[in-house]
Image: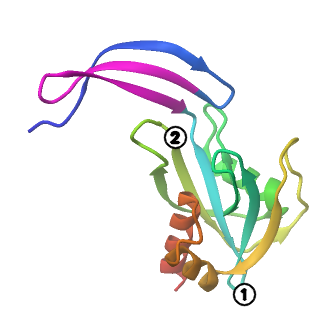
Amino acid sequence: MDLKEKIISTRDNIFDGRIFHVKVHDIELPDGKRSKREIVEHHGGVGVIAVTPERDVLMVTQYRIAADEMMLEIPAGKLEKGENPYDAGMRELEEETGYTTDKLEFLGEYYATPGYCTEKLSIYLAADLKYKGQHLDPGEFLNVTKIPLDKLYEMVMQNEIRDCKTAIAILKAKAILG
């Protein structure tokens, strides 16, 4: 059975915001019936798991209003339209933590919530870190801490890390670094 849904028509500009855009598709399902799909279009994001020679990971804690809780996350941010994820990763690492590196190792791309959102997250691993100085965006408030990679792995396995990009980054870094 072909599972692909066919777009019949699209209502655009349902919402056009600073971070995302919403449209609604009228679709035909694989069985021929009709339905609707509300789609959030997002330029994507990037996250960087930065590991020191001592195997400590630079983590940020910030309040996330959608979750209504403090979240422990890897440094991350949204892409500007057309921005290269690698360049955005370098930028976000320095802005949020104050650290830079000469190169990032690509760990993969992941959809945040593919049921209704186009946001694709690129995740990188950073090592050989050098402190240059933090410079947060206006209105950005976060705390930076260093946490051992092994402790973070345990936190993921105990469901104490609730941010998906962060959990994926920790699991991949642990698999690569041992």
Mark 2 element type: loop
In the rendered structure, the answer to whether residue 43 lies left or right of residue 109 reads right
Which corner quadrant of the image does residue 123 belong to?
bottom right
Which mark, residue 54?
Answer: 1
Q: Name the amino acid, label 2.
A: Glu
Label 1 is placed on what type of residue?
A: Glu
In this view, 18 is above or below 148: above
Q: Residue 133: x percent and y percent?
A: 91, 61
> What is the quadrant of residue 44 in the picture?
top right
Tell me the crowding category of disc 2: few under 14, some 14 to 19, or many 20 or more residues within 10 angstroms, Cα based.
Answer: many
**Foreground of the two, 93 or 70:** 70
Question: Residue 2: which numbered mark, if any?
Answer: none
Residue at image location 47% in from the left, 36% down from the top = 118
Question: Callout 1: helix, strand or loop?
Answer: loop
**Residue 29 in magenta stretch:** yes
Residue 15 among magenta residues: no
| Mark 2, residue position | 119
Q: Is residue 92 left or right of residue 118?
A: right
Q: Position of residue 77 (x, y in %)?
A: 68, 48
Q: Residue at x 72, y 68 (%)?
A: 59
Q: Residue at x 20, y 27 (%)?
A: 29
Nearest to N terminus: mark 1 or mark 2: 1
- Residue at 67 percent across and 35 percent down: it is 80
Residue 143 coordinates in the image, percent (x, y):
83, 63
From mark 1 to mark 2, how far is it between C-alphas?
33 Å
Judge depth for marks 1 and 2 and give the one in front: 2
Q: What's drawn in magenta, residue-wise?
A: 21-41
Q: Is residue 101 visible?
A: no
Front residue of this view, candidates 18 and 120: 18
